[in-house]
Image: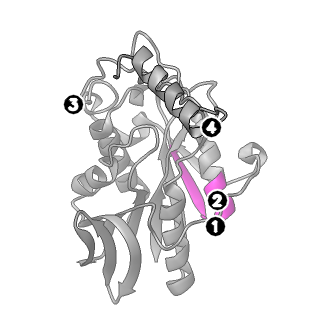
């Protein structure tokens, strides 16, 4: 079985810096990591490889230093990585990203199964996986929890709104995997920058993409403003000598805040 896992490098910090002009996340110089849900997607790929054999390839779109997440996946068991990188891809929304990744996958070759995480920690849209499936004209199943092969088809237990659902579809297919999946790849706490790995870098010229469908030009949405939510005021610990005094103190605090 030939499996492809789409992964993403995301910021590894809680406080993100935003470019005041472009409104994009400032990724250069920001510590990064493999998107947490992608460990579950890669875990499903490893499980199927153990069951039926085959190869796992990984792909990501991003700046040159995004190759570190590919190196991590190769250390976990992938055979080869593909870095889709070009300045022209900068500022892409999910539509332009899905288009670019789909074209890159077509360029690389055919796969029996394409996995993605159900969402990324920096965007949380859950749109790229389904968009890849639409561009490639492949069946898709989202929010997978458990995956089994049955001949040339796939049986998937997925997380639904009203409970779990059991769905089948033919191969090849695209499957997005959620945090509730039954298999997760092990996190490797290493510095992957020095690891030698088989990584192919693919740029826009190689893919012969329509310039009006990539990066900001190909984006259907525009970020108007990015800002941090207002911080929640910390609670107050009331430690008085007795319950009566504690109650009086609480009433005093509530009155100061005009809540009584």
What x and y, as percent, mark residue 191? 76, 46
- Residue extending farthest to the bottom is 151
Residue bearing the label numbered 4: 242
Number of other residues with Cα within 10 Å of mark 3, as a class: few under 14, some 14 to 19, many 20 or more:
few
Q: Quadrant of the C terminus?
A: top left
Which numbered disc, 3 or 1, marks the residue that appears first in the sequence? 1
In space, the residues marked 4 and 3 are separated at their CA atoms by 61 Å
Number of other residues with Cα within 10 Å of mark 1, as a class: few under 14, some 14 to 19, many 20 or more:
some
Residue bearing the label numbered 2: 74
Q: Is residue 103 left or right of residue 35?
A: left
> SS class of the residue under badge 1?
loop
Which residue range is magenta in the image? 72-83
Give yes or no for contact between labels 2 and 1 (Cβ–Cβ under 8 Å): yes
Q: Residue at x 60, y 51 (%)?
A: 70
Q: Is residue 81 left or right of residue 134?
A: right
Between label 4 and label 3, give the one nearer the viewer: 4
């Amino acid at each position: 079985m030939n499996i492809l896992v789409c992964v993403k490098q995301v910021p590894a910090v809680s406080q993100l810096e935003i470019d005041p002009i472009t409104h994009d996340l400032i990724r250069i110089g920001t510590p990064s990591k493999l998107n947490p849900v992608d460990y579950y997607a890669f875990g499903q790929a490893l499980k199927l490889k153990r069951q039926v054999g085959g190869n796992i390839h990984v792909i990501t779109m991003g700046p040159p230093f995004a190759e570190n997440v590919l190196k991590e996946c190769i250390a976990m068991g992938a055979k080869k990585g593909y870095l889709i990188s070009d300045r022209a891809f900068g500022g892409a929304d999910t539509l332009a990203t899905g288009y670019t990744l789909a074209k890159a996958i077509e360029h690389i070759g055919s796969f029996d199964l394409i996995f993605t995480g159900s969402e990324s920690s920096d965007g949380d849209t859950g749109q790229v996986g389904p968009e890849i499936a639409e561009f490639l004209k492949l069946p898709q199943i989202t929010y997978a929890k458990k995956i089994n092969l049955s001949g040339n088809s796939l049986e998937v237990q997925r997380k639904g709104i009203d409970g779990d659902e059991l769905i089948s579809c033919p191969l090849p297919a695209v499957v997005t995997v959620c945090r509730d999946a039954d298999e997760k790849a092990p996190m490797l706490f290493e510095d992957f920058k020095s690891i030698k790995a088989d990584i192919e870098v693919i740029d826009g010229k190689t893919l012969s993409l329509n310039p009006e469908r990539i990066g900001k030009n190909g984006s259907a949405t525009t970020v108007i403003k990015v800002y941090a939510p207002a911080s929640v005021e910390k609670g107050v610990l009331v430690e008085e000598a007795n319950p009566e005094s504690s109650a009086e103190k609480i009433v005093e605090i509530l009155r100061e805040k005009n809540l009584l």
